[in-house]
Image (cartoon, helix red, strand yellow):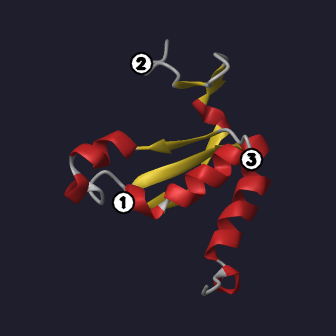
């Protein structure tokens, strides 16, 4: 029997398609402001990622928990580097008062 739900695909900037089955959730956020710096670092590292539910939460911000939050999905081949970036952001010793 044919699948009722078509395979989800993400189009990259270069125009190639990625099968979303190759992406894994590594973090969940409630509001977009929580991951602004993280997005910049992931883009700078040229990793393949997507924030799922981002648009829905921007339209209905108080429903974030009902949607399951904003999920950070990272391609399996980029998991190690993305996890390292996320851990560095969560490390309080990286905070410096200037």
**Callouts 3 and 2 close, C-beta under 8 Å:** no
Which of the pair 49/37 is nearer the observer? 37
39 up-or-down from 48: above or below: below
Q: Nearer the viewer, mark 2 or mark 1?
A: 1
Quarter placement of the C terminus: bottom right
Q: Estimate how packed mark 1 is, as few (under 14), some (14 to 19) or many (20 or more) residues with alpha carbons within 10 Å.
A: some
Which-is-in-front pick, marks 3 and 1? 3
Question: Residue 31, labelled with which disc?
Answer: 1
Nearer to me, 7 or 11? 11
Which residue does the numbered mark 2 point to in the structure image? 4
Question: Label 3 belongs to which residue?
Answer: 45
Mark 3, Cα crowd under 10 Å, few <14 / some 14-19 / many 20+, is few
Circle 1: element type:
loop
N-terminal-most mark, 3 or 1? 1
Q: Which mark is residue 17?
A: none
Q: Quadrant of residue 12?
A: top right
Left or right, residue 32 beside residue 9: left
Q: Determine the secondary structure under disc 2.
A: loop
Task: Identify the secondary structure beneath mark 3.
Answer: loop
Residue 53 in picture, x, y percent from top left: 38, 44
3 and 1 marks in contact (CB < 8 Å): no
Q: Nearer the viewer, residue 11 or 7?
A: 11
């Amino acid at each position: 029997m044919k699948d009722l739900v078509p395979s989800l695909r993400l189009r990259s900037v270069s125009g190639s398609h990625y099968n979303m089955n190759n992406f894994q959730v590594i973090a969940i956020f409630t509001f977009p402001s929580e991951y602004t710096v993280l997005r910049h670092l992931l883009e700078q590292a040229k990793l393949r990622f997507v924030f799922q539910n981002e648009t829905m939460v921007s339209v209905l911000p108080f429903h974030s928990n009902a949607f399951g939050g904003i999920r950070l999905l990272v391609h399996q081949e980029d998991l190690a580097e993305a996890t390292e970036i996320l851990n560095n952001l969560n490390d309080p010793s990286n905070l410096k008062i200037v």
